[in-house]
Amino acid sequence: MEMRNGRYSFFDGGLLSYIGWVMLGTIITVVTLGICFPWALTMLYGWKINHTVIEGRRLHFTGSAIDLFGHWIIWFLLSVITLGIYSFWVFIKLEDWKAANTTFAD
C-alpha cells in the first residue's frame, strides 16, 4: 500500500511535467486543426490518472485515443443534429468515458 507524507491518497505529478504535456497537447491540436484533440485529452487524462493514488492504490488509465475519437465523432454529429443542445451532455459523457477507462493498477 503506497503512502506519501503520512497520507494514503495523494497526487504525485509535477508542475513542469504537466506544463510539458499541456504544451504538447496544444501544439498537436493546433497543428492538426483540432482533429487530434481526443488524443490530447487522452494523453492528459492518462497523465493525471496515472499519477493519482487513492487509499494507497494507484489508479491506471486504459483509454485510447482511437476509442475516444469514435465517441467524439458520434457526440459531434449528435450536437450538429440537435443544433448544439447535445453539446451540454458531452462533458458528462466524457467524464463517464474517463471513469469507465480508469482502474486500479494492482
Image: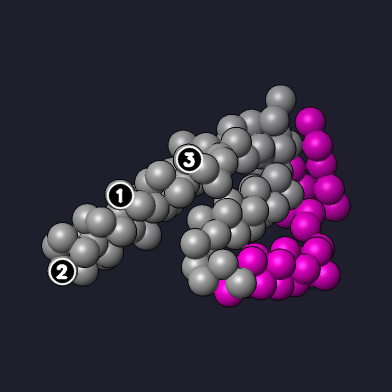
Front position in the image: 56 or 81:
81
Q: How many marks?
A: 3
Residue 72 appears in view: yes
Amino acid carrying label 2: it is Leu
Dot 1 lies on which element?
Answer: helix
Residue 74 — which label? Answer: 1
* Residue to which mark 2 is pinned: 83
List x then y, in percent, for residue 37: 52, 62
The residue segment tinted magenta is 1-30
Counting residues from the N terminus, which is met first, the one under dot 2 or under dot 1?
1
Q: Are marks 1 and 3 in contact (CB under 8 Å)?
A: no
Q: Quadrant of the N terminus?
A: top right
Residue 22 appears in view: no
* Quadrant in the rendering for residue 27: bottom right
List x then y, in percent, for residue 35: 49, 62
The Cα atoms of the two marked residues, 1 and 3, are separated by 11 Å
Does residue 100 appear left or right of residue 89 in this picture?
right
Residue 67 — which label? Answer: 3
